[in-house]
Amino acid sequence: MSLIPYNRVKLARDSERPTGLDYIRHIFKGFIEFHGDRRFADDHALIGGVARLNGNPVTVIAIEKGHTAKERTYRNFGAAHPEGYRKALRLMKQAEKFGRPVICFVDTSGAYCGIGAEERGQGQAIAENLMKMSTLCVPIISILIGEGGSGGALALAVADRVWMLQNAVYSVISPEGCASILWKDSSKAEMAAARLKLTAEDAKSLGVIERILSEDDIGKKEFYERIRALLAQELVELSQDLDLVGKRYERFRRIGVDAVNKE
């Protein structure tokens, strides 16, 4: 049964939905978490480190929301500070140095927009990630597992392959934020969601993502094994590509073009 876009948003925000840590624990082996951005602090909303995927070393980065109220408060509800994005950048540079592929799991309503985050250069931190990921000389795969909100999500999604779970969403702004701006009424979020083209099907039709992952067995052993197999297969193909950066550039230049041409 097809769901209206705002119902997809509700599913993407469900506290019972698997988070970044769940994927790390069930898909990878020997995960070693790294901490801090070497400038200010360690951001608990963003987790990163090295692990093995089918025996091969990879760098894994995930935005973590948590499940319980206590966990979500500790993780700042998945809203990363600039030091979180700088930690991610540090890990991506390290991955490039040692030739490790980068796998990102994205689940955030957006980067944290508090005064402290702005004072410490939130916009610049996100921009630096976008710039570095566009030229990173190792394969990058990003999976949107829940919410993909604005620049906070894009900062981990300038990748060779971008996938979305069936009920994940990807948008320049939350439906509530959009409704507040356009109609000065956040209660019109359902209307805004329908116009934002934020579903996985919308993203695929626009060329924003390559693959939609079924949620029929979400959270089960078979679900994680399926994603592990897909990641391993995709990394084999990407590792053989001698023009990763050039094709990554062309990938983002093509977004939306085919959809416009069809019209």
Image (spheres, rainbow, N blue to C red):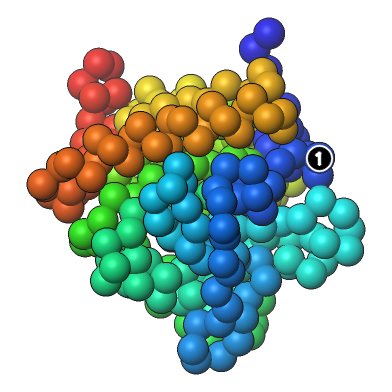
Q: Where residue 205 sits: x, y (%)?
A: 38, 23
Q: Is residue 263 left or right of residue 157?
A: left
Is the residue 262 above or below the residue 181 in the image?
A: above
Q: Where residue 220 sits: x, y (%)?
A: 71, 29
Is the residue 89 above or below the residue 193 in the image?
A: below
Which residue has dot 1 on it? 16
Q: Where residue 121 sits: x, y (%)?
A: 48, 82
Q: Which is nearer the eye, 137 or 196?
A: 137
Q: How many marks?
A: 1
Q: Where residue 195 sits: x, y (%)?
A: 54, 30
Q: Secondary structure at mark 1?
A: loop
Q: Residue at x 62, y 27 (%)?
A: 223
Q: Which is nearer the eye, 15 or 62?
A: 62
Please state which amino acid type lies under the numbered disc 1. Answer: Glu
Q: Quadrant of the C terminus?
A: top left
Q: Quadrant of the N terminus?
A: top right
Q: Which is nearer the eye, 157 or 181?
A: 157
**Mark 1 crowd level (few <14, some 14–19, many ≥20, 10 Å Cα):** few
Q: Residue at x 73, y 66 (%)?
A: 75
